[in-house]
Image (cartoon, rainbow, N blue to C red):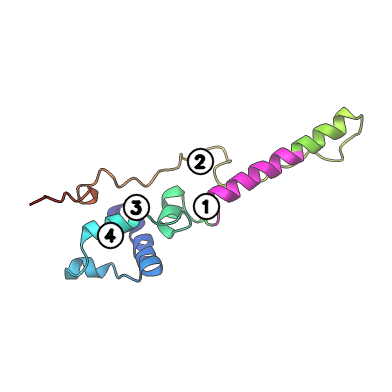
């Protein structure tokens, strides 16, 4: 993750959401396992999630805002269709709300999946 250019996003999120310093991993006061566990539960508006989604153009675009944009687009086109069906003329075509994923040529969104990382495996508690 650090070598892929997400180090600053990781640093920012640990500080913002958990009040932790990434340098504590190298100091030995913060375990990598804990960092991985915390990162799996970052909110969708975290810097790391935005960086994985494609960068700053995705900032502010949560599941809810994507759904609202879809509803607004459907409403605009339904309204235009209603005008046409009733014999009216549109002054201009309805413009859809452009979402960061709605542009052609975008690379597919990467999902943050840390479940296969060895430090993110469940802790086994032995009985006895």
- At horizontal 37% and vertical 54% (from top left) the residue drawn is 41
- Which of the two discs, 3 and 4, labels the residue nearer the N terminus? 4
Query: How far apart in space, not on screen, are marks 4 and 1 (Cα)?
Result: 24 Å
Mark 1: few/some/many CA within 10 Å (<14, 14-19, 20+):
some
Residue 96 makes an appearance in the image: no
Q: Are marks 3 and 1 in contact (CB under 8 Å)?
A: no
* Depth check, front residue: 64 or 96: 64
Mark 2: few/some/many CA within 10 Å (<14, 14-19, 20+):
few
Of the numbered discs in the image, which one, if any, rests on residue 58?
Answer: 1
Q: Which residue is mark 4?
A: 35
Q: Which residue is mark 2?
A: 106
Mark 4: few/some/many CA within 10 Å (<14, 14-19, 20+):
some
Of the numbered discs in the image, which one, if any, rests on residue 40?
Answer: 3
Q: Secondary structure at mark 4?
A: helix
Region in magenta: 60-76
Mark 3: few/some/many CA within 10 Å (<14, 14-19, 20+):
few
Of the numbered discs in the image, which one, if any, rests on residue 10?
Answer: none
Q: Is residue 98 above or below residue 19?
A: above
């Amino acid at each position: 993750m650090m070598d892929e250019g997400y180090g600053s996003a990781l640093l920012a999120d640990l500080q913002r959401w958990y009040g932790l310093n990434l340098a504590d991993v190298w100091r030995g006061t913060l375990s990598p396992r804990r960092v991985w566990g915390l990162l799996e539960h970052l909110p969708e508006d975290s810097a790391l999630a935005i960086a994985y989604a494609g960068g700053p153009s995705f900032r502010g675009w949560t599941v809810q805002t994507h759904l609202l944009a879809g509803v607004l687009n459907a409403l605009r086109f339904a309204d235009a269709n209603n005008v046409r069906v009733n014999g009216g003329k549109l002054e201009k075509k309805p413009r859809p709300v452009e979402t960061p994923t709605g542009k052609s040529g975008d690379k597919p969104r990467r999902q943050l999946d840390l479940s296969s990382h060895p430090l993110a495996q469940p802790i086994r508690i032995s009985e006895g």
